[in-house]
């Protein structure tokens, strides 16, 4: 198997893990509530998708639990250790 395929597989597995962990910790619900708050504040007719993304992205990043970040980082490090020649 080529390294690109291995990396692609890892990326897919990490994305699936991240999605599951974010749902599990309530991140998705928190972000959805924040989106609703932004729309309520600005008014539906005054909010574009771009505005919403700009407003919500920093909050979304901040809401990712440290444990989830650490787990993903550890999995990436383990992959690199196992697949990088000395």
Image (cartoon, grey):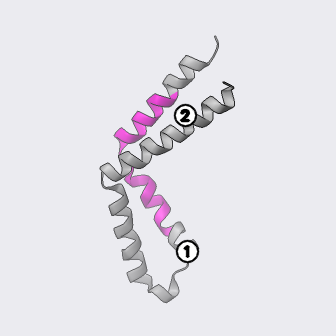
Question: Quadrant of residue 28 in the image?
Answer: bottom left
Q: Position of residue 46 (x, y in %)?
A: 51, 86
Identified at 41% across, 71% down, the residue is 35
Question: Number of callouts in the render?
Answer: 2
Looking at the image, is 83 positioned above or below residue 59? above
Q: Can you tell which of label 2 and label 1 is closer to the viewer?
A: 2
Identified at 38% across, 75% down, the residue is 36
Identified at 44% across, 86% down, the residue is 43
Left or right placement of residue 83 versus residue 13 in this view: right
Looking at the image, is 28 positioned above or below residue 68? below
Query: Where is the C terminus found, in terms of image quarters?
Result: top right
Q: Position of residue 82 (x, y in %)?
A: 54, 17
3D distance between C-alphas at marks 2 and 1: 31 Å
| SS for dot 1 | helix
Q: Which residue is mark 1?
A: 49
Query: Where is the N terminus found, in terms of image quarters?
Result: top right
Label 2 with label 1: CB-CB less than 8 Å: no
Question: Quadrant of residue 69 in the image?
Answer: top left
Q: Nearer the viewer, residue 12 or 38?
A: 12
Identified at 61% across, 36% down, the residue is 8
Give the mark, 2 or 1, whose residue is nearer the N terminus. 2
Residue 25 — which label? none
Does 74 appear in magenta?
yes
Q: Which residue is mark 2?
A: 10
Query: Magenta region's main secondary structure?
Result: helix
Farthest-out residue, front: 1
Magenta highlight range: 55-76
Does 57 appear in magenta?
yes
Farthest-out residue, bottom: 45
């Amino acid at each position: 198997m080529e390294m690109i395929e291995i990396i692609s597989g890892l990326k897919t597995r990490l994305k699936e893990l991240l999605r599951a962990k974010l749902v599990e910790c309530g991140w998705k619900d928190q972000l959805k509530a924040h989106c609703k708050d932004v729309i309520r504040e600005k008014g539906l007719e005054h909010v574009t998708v771009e505005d919403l993304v700009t407003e919500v992205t920093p909050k979304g990043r901040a809401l990712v639990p440290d444990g989830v970040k650490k787990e993903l980082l550890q999995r990436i490090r383990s992959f690199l250790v196992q697949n990088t020649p000395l």
